Amino acid sequence: MKLDNFFVELKRRNVIRMAGLYLVGAWLLIQVASTVLPTFDVPTWAIRGLIIIVALGFIPTLIFSWIFEMTPEGLKRDQEVPPEQSIAPQTARRMDRMIIVVLVLALAYFALDKFVLGPRRDRAPNELSASVSSQSIAVLPFVNMSSDKEQEYFSDGLSEELLNQLAQIPQLRVIARTSSFSFKGKEVDVSTIAKALNVANVLEGSVRRSANTLRVTAQLIRASDSSHLWSQTYDRDRTDIFKVQDEIAADVVAALKVKLLPTQELPKAPRTNNPEAYQQYLQGRYYLNRFSIADFEKARVFLERAAELDPKFPLAWAALSQVWNLETGWSDKLTRAEFDAGVVRARDAADRALKLDPDLPEALTARFAIQFYFDFDWKGGAETIRRAQALAPSDPLVLISAAQVAAIFGDYARGVVLARRAVALDPVNAQVRVYLGNALLQARKSAESRTEYERVAELNPSTPWAYAGGGMVDLFEGKNAEALAAAEHETTEFARLVVSAVALWNLGRKEESDAALATLIKDDADVGAFQIAEVYSGRGDKDNAFLWLDRARRQQDPGLAYYPNDPLLDPLRSDPRWMAFHRSMGLAEDQLK
């Protein structure tokens, strides 16, 4: 068949029209699916599968259109239809109308997405939900009214234990401690606090201790009109503090009209009977929640003392494991011996917490961190955090851990959903927002990621990656000068060096880039091989990047928990060695984007 005749036949058999109709319809289907399905937590592999199916169906559809013709009697092979009986021209007109209709729908969807859905997505990370559940509450730190200011941790402890009990009620959305306690000592009215935390109710109170007497005053306030829903004063012997906590929690639940658990009893938090151990634990938690490298050591000192005073206090061991994990994974200039010792101590503390209380969510989260960051036991870590989620579905750190599991298995959309839930429960926690910023960057939502890192810098400038995280977004977008400027504000040296080395190289300042990389190798070669691999990859040196990635694997570098979709490693993904490395990390090939 001559080429001219071939094109004439394509037109006569409506193959060209079928191609246009298929492509426009497929585009519209994929765009709608990409918008709607993530709303229902449908994993990204399902969307990728839809795209593959649609792509594979294109050629067979054209072949089908070439071979068959629609007739009044149904489908027939084109060769079997005499020219005088062919209704191909009528079919062509119908297809033209169908193409016009689908094009109109596609344009309407494009306009809807650009002018309605798009702006809403852009605003979503920064706006509070318009509808605030009536079953939501923030527990503010109770005010210490005692003359002895050293009793501050006692009043904080009462607030925290009350918060912990309320958080275990699935029908109640309770804002996490870090966000609730961020208003401590500030002259802020209840309505402003409620708006910032997106809650309908606020519980506040005071504690006065003198000799052996304890007076606790608590009041539940409805934020919409600042009215008192309930208030109560408790006068007790100071030895009855835990009983007072339980009474207050039960009264608050009744006031909110929340259906209690099937047992009709509030779960009891794992406590210690040693008041000094408890005070040390609270002080350790205070520094731990500040989430800065300078505070990790302070937290560890208090938590070690708490565990020493009461070796059977599981919360102390779980928090101590978390501190060792953070110190080992985030600190600058560790020696190999210090790194190895930190991993051993984090593992030991997590094991001790679980032995004391196998169903303690904090202990399970501590074990997850060991499995995920140091053992690369992705499947084991996923199972551990699944258990923790079942026990504490509203714990922000549990949700963040679940988000990291979703990301390591390639479900970046679900990772973002879970990280956003964590931020909603703890909106002024810089640590939680760092993980959300990273989840958004892995999902390639760079604008939203930048917004989160800017918020982190506002909340706590000394948080690791507070500024370098924004610099990573700049690198991804090719804004090297902006990335370098952002890195200059970073307080964590290894994060600053990673971003600076790549930005300087891309700006043509190769000697300065070499100097930054040399410093990184000198200080962190034994414990930060992953970051060195990132720099080599960002500079286009694939050979050295793969060498340092393999070294990171052998060193148990916790940074590898982020490798599958790290933007700085994008240049490596087309290299055959990438898939080999992926398999060496124990992940299947279909788990890569």
Image (cartoon, rainbow, N blue to C red):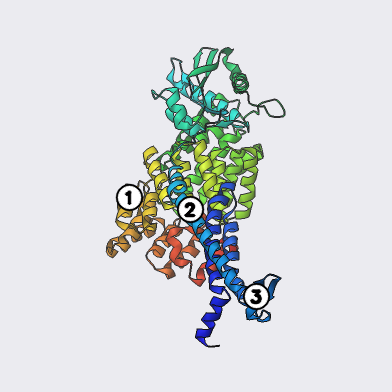
- Tell me which residue sits at (61%, 50%) in the image: 381
Query: Of helix, strand and loop, which one carries label 1?
Result: helix
Q: Earlier in the sequence, mark 1 or mark 3?
A: 3
Contact, CB < 8 Å: mark 1 with mark 3?
Answer: no
Q: In front: 548, or 138? A: 138
**Amino acid type indicated by mark 2:** Ala
Contact, CB < 8 Å: mark 2 with mark 3?
Answer: no
How far across and down, in percent of the image, does residue 365 sit?
Answer: 58, 43
> Mark 1 = which residue?
486
- Tell me which residue sits at (53%, 73%) in the image: 16
What is the residue that sits farthest to the bottom in this orientation?
A: 2
Q: In front: 247, or 243? A: 247
> Mark 2 = which residue?
108
Query: Of helix, strand and loop, which one carries label 3?
Result: strand
Q: Earlier in the sequence, mark 2 or mark 1?
A: 2
How far across and down, in percent of the image, does residue 102 sit?
Answer: 53, 59
**Amino acid type indicated by mark 3:** Phe
How far across and down, in percent of the image, does residue 177 sit?
Answer: 50, 32
The quadrant holding residue 212 is top right
> Mark 3 = which residue?
68
**Amino acid type indicated by mark 1:** Ala
The quadrant holding residue 257 is top right
Label 1: how many Cα within 10 Å (few below 14, some 14–19, many 20+): many
How far across and down, in percent of the image, does residue 254 sit?
Answer: 63, 21
Instruction: Kindly report the distance in space between the C-alpha atoms of the residues bearing marks 2 and 1.
Output: 40 Å
Query: Of helix, strand and loop, which one carries label 2?
Result: helix
Residue 174 seen from this side? yes
- 432 w.r.t. 110: above or below: above
